[in-house]
Image (tube, helix red, strand yellow):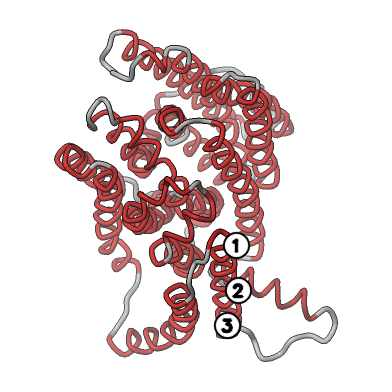
Amino acid sequence: MTGRATRHSAILIAAFAVTSLLNYVFGVALSWFLSPSQFGVLGVAQSLLLLAALVVGSGFPWAAAQDLARAGPTTSTRHRFRAAWTGNFGLGLLLAGCLWAAYDSGLLELGPAYRQIIPLIALTTVLLAARAAINGAARGSYKFAGVAVNMVSDATLKVGIGLVLVIAGAGVAGVIAGFVLATTATLFHSLWMVKPERLWSGTGWFDPQVLRVTFPLFLGMIGPALMLNLDILGLKILAPASQGDQMAGLYQAVVILARTPVFVAQSLTLVLFSYVAKITASGNHGGAATYLKSAIKVWSRLLLPGALILILAPRAALHLFYPEQYQASILALRIAAAGGLLLALMTLLIGVFQAEGDRGRPAVIASVATGAQIVVLLTLVPRLGVNAAALSLLAAGGIGAIGMIPMIASRFQVNLSNFLQSSARYFYRGGIPVLALTIVLLTLPDGGRLGAFLKLSLAGMLYAIALLGTHLTPSIPRDRPVKHILSQFVNVLMGG
């Protein structure tokens, strides 16, 4: 990546790390305040909200980001932004109405526990739709620092307000009410962030071209979003009625961890998409291929080791974050972590290819992978329960990642000699750090919560040291050497 793209990626990943920490603390705290059944209700509610949020964030916001990244704020792009914002807000209203109608009519059979929760989810969906298009414009204007502040503020407010309401006895409805208030506050911040672009000035609030551009973008971006949430929703709906919330609660603990690589990939895609769109608009397709290589490198250096921790040491990961009763989900965590890792790769590749303008093939691949996940859920959940939900995520991620291989191959011309040389170099630079990580995870015992923390911390530190050692340049400036080494480490993680 370029220096600017690396900085912006690091900013958003740092924001993701902060929001993840807040969300993990929030999730773990709620697992102590709520029963497993209530935790299951929360998991289903959050999946519905995430699904709605990703629907309103998967089309029009990306069209707005691509448009502004390519041409900047002009009379035409301002007009198309307003059309995108209007379309997204209308989509939010439609989703909210359909959600309530499906629940009230009994089509969405969730039970009386969701009577107060569904209207709150619907209201949050409308607010998220309004905010998502504005944040898309902010990304297209390269305001990534502001977007990061928006992300952290949203998570902080949700956690703070939600915990206060839960402790006060509001239950799951209090958690979702916190989402409503946090989204409202950050919507005002988003409006302030894009104020200098004067996006609301001018006439016209509709443009058919925006709809034509958005539809294939939507199909490609919504695929990973669906895959990330269909597992827990399918588990709730397809499991035996008396066990649905209990199973969803156990699986919720799994996916909070297993989704991490995908969320990091989504954060990186926010940056990569804008830069690839801009460089492709200038006709520099070689530069776009460089970003594609960086995406694959950051997946292998940053996301792969994180998933390996969950696959090779699931007991330690669950013991570190959750009460003992969640140890029943060890196998599901292993399977879901592998699926999340593959889905993260798919997310990065779809973002790069669609920013280049190749929208049709990613949309088809995403649709096929989503269909495979639904088939696994329908056939296996009644027999395998929680493990079937994890297998559905693995099936979706695996098919999606495999489907992307021909697209990657078409971007690069590699002969046998170059392939063997690059494989040897990759084994040295990538294999040694992964080997160091794996040895620690497989040999050291867990030894309680403290032992699990020490084991995972040591594995992470040895991986970082080995990665830096295999990539460190021989010459290090004498002035501020520590800063130079840390800067180089960040650059390596970001695909440099």
Crowd band around label 2 with a 10 angstrom C-alpha radius: few (<14), some (14–19), many (20+): few
Residue type at the position of mark 1: Leu
Look at mark 3 in the image and give the residue it sits on: 471
Question: Of marks 1 and 2, which one's residue comes earlier in the chain?
Answer: 1
Residue placed furthest toward the left: 379
Q: Residue 461 got which mark?
A: 2
In front of the other: label 1 or label 3? 1
CA–CA distance in space, label 3 to label 2: 16 Å
Q: Taking 252 as reference, is 7 left or right?
A: right
Crowd band around label 1 with a 10 angstrom C-alpha radius: few (<14), some (14–19), many (20+): few
Crowd band around label 3 with a 10 angstrom C-alpha radius: few (<14), some (14–19), many (20+): some
Question: Of marks 1 and 3, which one's residue comes earlier in the chain?
Answer: 1
CA–CA distance in space, label 1 to label 3: 32 Å
Look at mark 1 in the image and give the residue it sits on: 450
Q: How many marks?
A: 3
Q: Mark yes or no: residue 281 visible.
A: no
